[in-house]
Amino acid sequence: MKRIKSALALSLGILFSTPALAEWPEQNITIIVPAAPGGTTDIVSRIIGEKMGQELGQTVVVENKAGAAGIIGTQALVRAKPDGYTLIMGNIGPNAINYSLYDSLPYKKDDFTPITLVISVPNVLVVNEATPVNTVSELIKYVSENKDRQNFGSSGKGQSPHMSAEMFLQRANLDAEHIPYKGAGPAVSALLGNQYTFMIDNLPSSLPSIQSGKFKALAVTSDARVAELPDVPTMKEAGIDNMVVTAWFGLLAPAGTPDDVVAKLHKAAKTALESEDVKTRFAGMGGQPGGNTPAEFATFIEDQQALWADTVKAANLKMD
């Protein structure tokens, strides 16, 4: 009997000295990309996901869920368990613009736990190499005089490229039809095929086509020229005032994700963003790396939501 009691005591001691749950993370982590492959959201997710996986000791998988201005992928995130194993690369569209652009959304502002800002990038006004324009003023004249070319593409309704183009049309006093695509990759492919006239795209997704000469870059939406395109003017230099737009992308988890898990995710992301190879790759995309705290990122998102609410109201834009 004493032996049985001793064995039982030893077993209980081992049981209670071992954590009830294995140390997080114990399985692969998924980053949802609410857009098609090939765009900035996708590119950035794969870059930082690889580095975070090395830091956390688990594989980080990128899963594309495109459609409906980022709503489909975002809805998938808020339905996921708040255990840190499912994240999303949020961005200015679904996490700021959409709240004022849509009367109804299948998610709320408090459905998310911010982790950190990952990258900020300017947008760029581009046309196909065959389009007979080389400046913003020439594009305005070309669009106004050619009814069959009064159209523009974007990575989706309500995304930063779409809203930037709407701003541009207002400031240039132009009318043009919007042709939305399920992400920057398909939008870039369509412009390479000259299927519409112009696009204001996040710089990283159009930069390869600009550098190869397949796109002509007419202006950037930053307040200063970008190092990767030193000969391309800002919108202000090109004659379009009040046209500074910065697109941003950052990691979010479902609301209710444990604080200690969020802290580990933030640490892994920050370490990745501070690595020289990521900084070099982001710089080559014309982007600025993030790394702010979850609290700072939450405040940033709130400010962006207010900013775009004013912009959407001034533009008198609404989506079904």
Image (cartoon, rainbow, N blue to C red):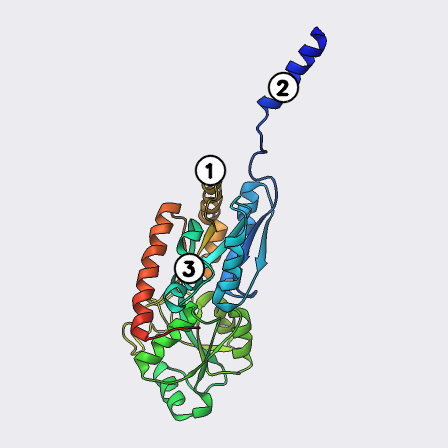
Label 3 or label 1, whichever comes before in sequence order = 3
Q: Distance between the residues labelled 2 and 3?
A: 48 Å
Q: Is residue 141 left or right of residue 216?
A: left
Packing grade of label 2 (10 A; few <14, some 14-19, many >=20) is few
Is residue 203 or residue 23 the one in the foreground? Answer: 23
- Judged from the image, the secondary structure of the residue bearing numbered disc 1 is helix
Residue 264 in percent (x, y) is at 48, 40
Q: Inspect this view and state whether residue 192 appears.
A: yes
Label 2 or label 3, whichever comes before in sequence order = 2
Q: Examine the image and state in which quarter residue 103 appears.
A: bottom left
Question: Is the residue under label 3 in contact with that under label 2 (CB below 8 Å)?
Answer: no
Residue positioned 53% across, 83% down in the render: 195
Report the number of discs: 3
Residue positioned 38% across, 48% down in the render: 292
Q: Is residue 178 above or below residue 36?
A: below
Q: Is residue 150 left or right of residue 87?
A: left
In the rendered image, which residue does mark 3 sit on?
A: 95
Rendered image: mark on residue 149: none
In the rendered image, which residue does mark 1 sit on?
A: 260
- Judged from the image, the secondary structure of the residue bearing numbered disc 3 is helix
Q: Which amino acid is tagged 2?
A: Leu
Q: In this view, does 58 lie above or below 152?
A: above
Rendered image: mark on residue 12: 2
Residue 182 in percent (x, y) is at 53, 70
Q: Examine the image and state in which quarter residue 96 appears.
A: bottom left
Question: Is the residue under label 1 in contact with that under label 2 (CB below 8 Å)?
Answer: no
Q: In which quarter of the image is the C terminus?
A: bottom left
- Judged from the image, the secondary structure of the residue bearing numbered disc 2 is helix
